Amino acid sequence: MSLPQAITRRALTTDDAQVVAALCGEDEAAFSGRPSQISANDVLAWWTGTDLANKSWLLEEDGRVVGVGWLEREDYGDLGTFVNVVAQGEKGRGLGAALMDIGEEAALATAAARLQTFAIGPDTAAAALFTSRGYREVRRFYEMAIDLDGPVEVPAVPDGLSLETFDESEARPFHDAMDEAFGDHWEHHPFPFEQWWQEKRDAPDYDPTLWFVVRDGDELAAVVRNDPERNGGGYVAALGVRRAWRRRGLARLLLLHSFAEFQRRGKSRVSLGVDAESPTGATKLYEGVGMHVEMDMVVFEKARP
């Protein structure tokens, strides 16, 4: 589907992060019924690994942004994933279909055997568009959050173990522990240590004092990586327990320790994302410490035509 003549297209740049945050935030607020917490920092985190110069698109009309999209990182094996958002007030004009054409073209230019895209759970129009293009729902993810309105009680560390702040000298064991912990998760895409470490260390909000480990002798049994400012507060970016140490309360320990540290730093809100069908029961863990679902995201997929 061709774009209306008055609409121009260009690639995104990191300078567009604030504009994209506002556009996506308005869309989220419209469907969730609550103020959005999306910031430019969140958008920059989304773009990690994305070739903005060649695999992104921004649509403008009369000086206003009417739609945006990008192809996510291309090192996910046989998967091509793209994201599109039509601005509030611009829906119903066929821009969603036009953005789908652009996104699919970008994904098909890779070696991807499968195409994936996303929609906010209540966005039935987007779901209908995807379905009409041959996509089907394959997964849901929850955005969960908690407001820390009282002291956080951190449980005792189990005997024989210790809870410590991450040391950069153990970056490789930390990477390996996280990779093992997520090995049985849906669509887990392991990255070589060197690539992973460079991306994390070079991130503008990298703060190793917010990464924690549970140690059992010379082994890292469980790890958590937190970001200082995402989604309106502290953010639990990744939390994993290696299989041999599961069912000992280590995930809960690291989660509550992270809450306490965020609170000590003046953060009253903490959020995270979780697979609604997590094989480790993560959703129940988060609910058990007082977190609640704020929004769900739906993943749609189809095989390469």
Image (cartoon, rainbow, N blue to C red):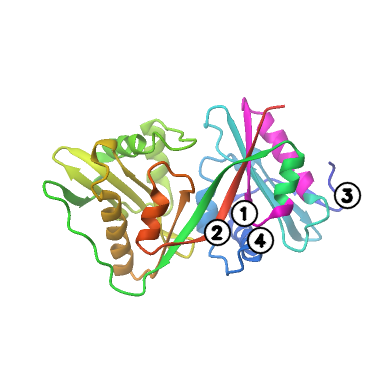
Residue at (32% x, 56% y) in the render: 255
- Residue tagged 2: 295
- Foreground tag (4 vs 3): 4
Distance in Å between CA atoms under marks 4 and 2: 12 Å
Would residue 105 be counted in the magenta stretch?
Answer: yes
Q: Which is more N-terminal, label 3 or label 4?
A: 3
Q: Position of residue 112 (x, y in %)?
A: 62, 28
Task: Pick the residue in front: 159 or 87.
Answer: 159
* SS type, badge 2: strand
* SS type, badge 3: loop
Residue at (65% x, 57% y) in the render: 122
Q: Position of residue 13 (x, y in %)?
A: 61, 49
Would residue 17 be counted in the magenta stretch?
Answer: no
Please tell me whether residue 30 is drawn above or below residue 127 in the rendered image. Answer: below
Q: Which is more N-terminal, label 2 or label 1?
A: 1
- Residue tagged 4: 27
* SS type, badge 1: loop
Query: Which residues, given as a range, are shown in magenta?
Result: 96-125
Question: In the image, what residue type sits under mark 1?
Answer: Gly
Task: Pick the residue in front: 234 or 185.
Answer: 185
Question: In the image, what residue type sits under mark 4?
Answer: Asp
Q: Which is more N-terminal, label 2 or label 4?
A: 4
Distance in Å between CA atoms under marks 4 and 3: 25 Å
Label 3 Cα neighbours within 10 Å, binned few <14 / some 14-19 / many ≥20: few
Distance in Å between CA atoms under marks 2 and 3: 35 Å
- Residue tagged 1: 121
Q: Which is more N-terminal, label 3 or label 2?
A: 3
